[in-house]
Amino acid sequence: MTVAESLAGARLVLRPFRCEDISERYLDWLGDVEVNCFSQRFGQTRPSPGEARRWLESRGPEELVYKTIDPALDHVGNIKAGPIDRANGRADISILIGDREAWHRGVGAEAVTC
């Protein structure tokens, strides 16, 4: 599968989320109960860098994870598409907006349209 190196919306840029993007700030988001109240990734505990890396590396070729970047705030969250069902033209989409400064600003909606 070809993965776009970046996707752009009106104010956001999405690019593939890589292991080097796993920062302390990102791990703090994953450990924030309110940010992750609906997440099934790690429950509601802050993962270690190794756990986050293993989760990212375990995504199959039919799952794409992109870093959501707001130029004013930098990395504000992630969006995951997959598993992708190519035969039926469908995919599940998961959105994590971890940076609370980006909440209620339409970031998730714009990320989906990129």
Image (cartoon, rainbow, N blue to C red):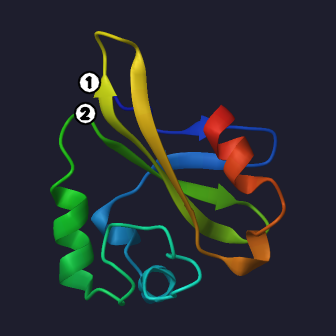
Mark 2 residue crowding within 10 angstroms, few (<14) / some (14–19) / many (20+): few
Where does the C terminus fall, quadrant-wise? top right
Residue 49's x, y, as percent?
26, 84
The residue shown at (65%, 45%) is 111
Element assignment for label 2? loop
The residue shown at (32%, 28%) is 84
Residue at which label 2 appears: 62
The residue shown at (66%, 69%) is 74
Residue at which label 1 appears: 1
Mark 1 residue crowding within 10 angstroms, few (<14) / some (14–19) / many (20+): few
At label 1, the amino acid type is Met
At label 2, the amino acid type is Glu
The answer for how far apart the CA atoms under marks 1 and 2 are is: 8 Å
Where does the N terminus fall, quadrant-wise? top left
Given residues 87 and 13, the one toward you in this image is 87
Residue 114 in sight: no
Residue 112's x, y, as percent?
62, 39
Residue 107 in sight: yes
State left or right for residue 54 relative to residue 107: left
Residue 57's x, y, as percent?
18, 58
State left or right for residue 87 relative to residue 10: left
Is the residue under label 2 in contact with that under label 1 (CB below 8 Å)?
A: yes
